[in-house]
Amino acid sequence: GMVMDAALALARYTEEKHPTRVFPPVEEMREVAVRVAVAVVKRAVSDGVAGADVGADVEGLVRSKLWNATYLPVRRAKR
């Protein structure tokens, strides 16, 4: 099901981008997360358990829902 599709998405990404590694580098975690999420959403739709209409552009939907960290600039504290 969904867990197997998630694992396969991770394995495919790793094999495609880094064939000599077991896991991709942490710097690529965001792209890996997209690929895994897309696979899981597609399985949820095919299994009839998706709680919403996801439309045809699953990857676009997943990317639109990603959290983006926004940090304030660092300032030196007054002494």
Image (cartoon, rainbow, N blue to C red):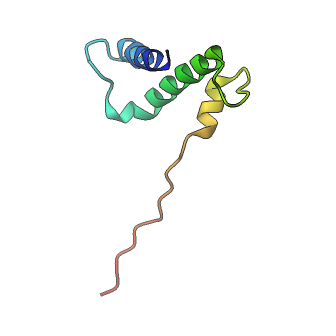
Q: Quadrant of residue 67?
A: top right
Q: Quadrant of residue 44?
A: top right
In front of the other: 39 or 21: 39
Q: Quadrant of the C terminus?
A: bottom left
In this rendering, the answer to whether 1 lies above or below 79 is: above
Q: Quadrant of residue 41?
A: top right
Residue, far bottom:
79
In front of the other: 60 or 36: 36
| Residue beneath the point at 70% across and 27% down | 54
What x and y, as percent, mark residue 15?
A: 36, 12
What x and y, as percent, mark residue 2?
A: 50, 19
| Residue beneath the point at 71% across and 31% down | 52
| Residue beneath the point at 49% across and 51% down | 69
What x and y, as percent, mark residue 61?
A: 65, 31
| Residue beneath the point at 47% across and 59% down | 71
In front of the other: 26 or 1: 1
In this rendering, the answer to whether 8 lies above or below 24 is: above
Q: How many marks?
A: 0
